[in-house]
Image (tube, rainbow, N blue to C red):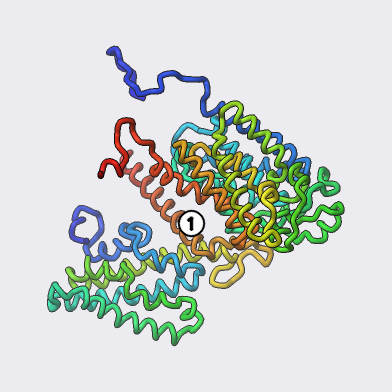
Amino acid sequence: MSAPSLTPEIVLRTSPHLHSKRSVGVIMRNVVYAMLPVCAYAVYNFGISVLALLVVSTLSCVLTEHMFCRAAGRPSSIKDSSVIITGILLGLTLPPGFPLWMTAVGGFVAVGLGKMLFGGLGFNVFNPALVGRAFLQAAFPTAITTYTPAQATGRFLEFIPTSLTLPFMQPPVITDWVAKVRIDAFSGATPLTALKFDKVTTEIMPLFWGNVAGSAGETSVILILLGGVYLVARNFMDWRITASMLLSAMAMSGAFYLSNPTAFPNPLFMLFSGGLMLGAVFMATDMVASPVTPLGVWIYGAVMGVMTILIRLLGGLPEGVMYAILLANAVSPAIDNLTQPRVYGTKKKAEAKA
Amino acid sequence: MGHDHGATVSPSENMEAFLNGLWKQNPVFVQVLGTCPTMAITNSARNAVAMGLATLFVLVFSNMLISMVRRLVQKQVRIATYILIIATFVTMVDYIIKAVSIDVYKALGPFIALIVVNCIILGRAEAFAGKNPVWQSILDGFGMGIGFFIALFCLGSVREILGAGTLFGFSLFGSNFQPWVLFLLPSGGFFTLASWLLVFAWWKERGKAKEAQA
């Protein structure tokens, strides 16, 4: 933005010359709307602890962005709503009873380290929410794998005991509490933990509707898909990334399943369990961290799908979506470079040599 | 070094040779040298202090000896000579640590021997001790060594406090403290170093801004 001068100005700019009313803010707010049903169901499924979790994670993200903007002497960028997405996503990926003080730390790391230090929206190399979650996973490995049962009795009246842990203190052990509140057949183990450590496969229908244990917002496949359909219908989301990630995950787990149906779970279970849906719809499609070329997005999605299944089935962790997406974020510039379309009129390398 | 800052306010060149390493040319926070031991052994304050002292010792004595022999050594073989001198003192430190505390010796592991190739030491030999008089070289060794020591202690204490809730093994927050496991892992070293670099860069920028205002 140059200072206004008295001489008449000729404005030179490159395309696009037509502007739609689609600002960053509009897109980001629509993504938030698409996530609201998922949030609502998460609160219904796990109670007020999740409500507090989402509020704390969003507030800490927004405050962090505001603080960093002030420290840099820039106008605050919280109005474009992108930081709200980060906050909600972070909350949705955490266990329902995750201590709130740790959530606040996660929000600070997500936005501070994952976004603002790189220069804010548009410059983040990784999906900020996942940077925050990866930090929490490394810092507090016990708390982040402590899951509580879904649909627990009295979940709207009392917090999960771990939620209200005092800052910097260890969350209490909640085995007794879980035994007290759980309804039959709902255990605290997530479908993927049950698979990894007990070799038990959960049925498909509960996974589809979402009344299973897991991270706050990852359980309901149908609501996540609905949010995705809304975003795709309004052209706010690149459906190819989601499709590619899900298809490749399906193909990969299908190959494992066919090779040994007793040792490996069926592909549909792999598709509907854990954070794969949430990751594929809301995180993999992060506009900044994903490639832009048409072929590139397919490759990008495939990297994530394949890595997710490999980590789940062959790695030490029950869930691999987070690391798969972060890894794909890291290679996304390389994918872009390798898939640059040939400029019209130029020759392919092989032809040029011959 | 030392000679080309004639306009600064330091009382003498000797003093400047000493202070340079502490602050303006701090080997870790400003030059970002010697990051290998900085990352590897700063998971507790005790290890950091031990490594800092060991490096300080080697740095002072190798600087001194190298400065003494600087006119006798042919240019073509100077690196080999420096390494030989440094390795001698590292061997001494190795035995000293083994004699003082076998626990620390085990915790530092191969990194004691690796002081030989610590780029701060060879860097000071090449950049300073090989060109300057003995007394200044000793002061430079002290400055750089203490600067390195401070940096390691900054990292080690933060990582131990957050990663284990203790400092030098004493519990700070009671038994219910939630340790941040991350800070004991190598990645925690990177996070901590980056945070300290951030703090120092911010501090310097602020100083510059104030100078510009004045």
- Above or below for B61 versus A209: below
Disc 1: which residue: B191
Q: Nearer the viewer, residue A163 or B186?
A: B186
Q: Nearer the viewer, residue B177 or B75?
A: B75
Q: Which quadrant is home to the C terminus of chain B?
A: top left
Q: Residue at x 22, y 62 (%)?
A: B12
Q: Which quadrant is home to the N terminus of chain B?
A: bottom left
Q: Amino acid at mark 1?
A: Phe
Residue B143 visible, this angle = no
**Horizontal and vertical percent position of residue A43:** 75, 41
Q: Residue at x 34, y 57 (%)?
A: B30
**Horizontal and vertical percent position of residue A340:** 38, 39
Residue A201 visible, this angle = yes
**Horizontal and vertical percent position of residue A190:** 73, 54
Q: Residue at x 72, y 49 (%)?
A: A96
- Above or below for A78 versus B54: above
Task: Give the crowd class for mark 1: few <14, some 14-19, many >=20 residues within 10 Å.
Answer: some
Q: Nearer the viewer, residue A73 or B180?
A: B180
- Above or below for B207 versus A174: above
- Above or below for A48 versus A6: below
Q: Label 1: chain?
A: B
Occupied quadrant, residue B26: bottom left
Q: Residue at x 12, y 76 (%)?
A: B74
Q: Name, please, the residue furthest toward the front.
A: A354
